[in-house]
Image: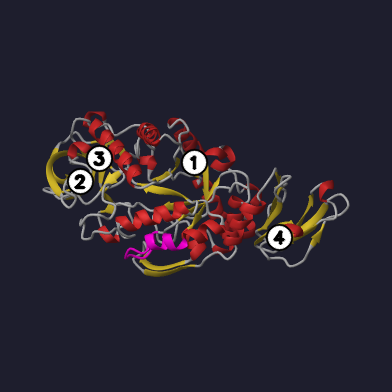
Amino acid sequence: MMKKAIILQFFHWYYPDGGKLWPEAVERAEQLAELGITAVWLPPPYKGASGGYSVGYDSYDLFDLGEFEQKGSRATKYGDKDGLLKAVNTLKDNGLEVYLDIVLNHKLGADEKEKIQVKKVDSDNRNDISNEVIEALAYTRFTFPGRQNKYSEYVWDFHSFSGVDYIEEPREEGIFKIVNDYADDGWNDEVDSENGNYDFLMGANIEYRNPAVMEELKRWITWLMETVPCDGFRLDAVKHIPAWFFKQWLDHARGTVQRDLFTVAEYWSHDLSILQQYLDLVDDKLMLFDAPLHLNFYHASKGGDEFDLTTIFDGSLVAANAEHAVTLVANHDTQPLQSLETPVDPWFKPLAYALILMREQGVPCIFYPDLFGASYQDEGSDGELYDIEMSAIEELPLLIQARQRFANGIQTEYFDDANCIAFVRSGTNEEPGCVVILSNGAENKKNIPLGDGFANKNYRDYLGKREETITTDEQGNADFPVNGGSVSVWVLEETMDS
């Protein structure tokens, strides 16, 4: 049986420093494959501005995979180049695909300041660009002295960027449009319309209309794929990057390796129409994370039995465009104390994971702390220190296994009760099916007609939440129970241990 796709995000924002991740990937590769994971999403593997402490989203040198003494260290937070290659090859040797996180919106940690001209921008309406030209110093020149032109001689200067958020002489923070060959055209088009135009996010904002920049980023991805045998990408912050760039860039990358490269982009919007519009702009060349569904999970976890479970997929990408949806319960941005903090309450996580793992639609993505746990300390927006404990979700390994074993055949929904929903996977001639039932209120049950072929059959709860055996009647009907605030996956008793 061909395995069904399950991606594991193999890191979180507060993963420990000290080069531990690449060795852990080597150590866990066999375990992940046996569990039923099919692909591993690794964090940005190149040098960030904060060197060995960088989570990876403060891009500095894309060509430094932990090979050069730059930004205070040779290795990245996750390990050195040799460790990265060993991790990737070990994962692949165990049959897992490897997706790399790609951050192309901005650069941070410039090596030199340049004397440039800028114009102030209204942060609430980025299309409101002042006519006054300011002479200033800005951190816009990247020469990568530690690398000494190995792999690429390209120097990033102010012609490579469209804006910055900090200048000196005069010293000021804000958003500043750089005056260069592309300034008269304003910001890039085909970006999110929040704040008028959401091209600018942070740091030195990359200018894709510069042909030299486009060529350098194409050259880089060719080099990366020759250096690291990856199978696809997770694209960061695409709402700030023109859609036309990724169309060209992905075509180039796929043409270089002569195969499809799985690509999922982070366009974090809860508006389904905006996600669909973006997919149109990129000619459906990639998948998107289902941010609206994640928000539904968050609200459902907070709402308890007042949330209408029959609406759980309303407005979601997976309901509207399943072939382009990657579904998730959490990620490094939504975890506590992070920028998009909307953590799903622990009681609801098993239900949410059942809804993305056991259904036919979408490609599910698992978050590292939900599988392995995590604990960390950080400052909240109120300035107070918080100790965060993210416990591993006990049911998650079983749900991953259940997807591979029982999520087969036609899907039939029973979304007829605001507090109790169910769906059936019919199974096939070769593979067994299941009955999945969820409650966000009290203990409940649902009468499910499975049909004559399932008459007088015994069912057990694969998750072990219910201990009884349920037997269908002569017509293949049965009442399938579920505990309060819980989920059960009922499977044929004869398939439990096979």
Comparing 209 with 451, the one in front is: 451
Please give the residue where the numbered disc 1 appears in the rendered image: 271
Magenta-highlighted residues: 13-28
Q: What SS does tag 2 mark?
A: loop
Q: Which percent across, then down, holds residue 262?
A: 46, 41
Task: Name which quarter of the figure residue 90 lies in.
Answer: bottom left
Earlier along the polypeptide chain: callout 3 or callout 4? 3
Three-letter code, disc 3: Val
**Residue 315 shows up from this direction:** no
Please give the residue where the numbered disc 4 appears in the rendered image: 496
Could you tell whether 284 is left or right of 418 in the image? Answer: left
Q: Which mark is nearer the camera, 4 or 1?
A: 4
Could you tell whether 265 is left or right of 473 in the image? Answer: left
Q: Which mark is nearer the camera, 2 or 3?
A: 2
Please give the residue where the numbered disc 3 appears in the rendered image: 121
Q: CA distance from mark 1 to mark 3?
A: 26 Å
Earlier along the polypeptide chain: callout 1 or callout 2? 2
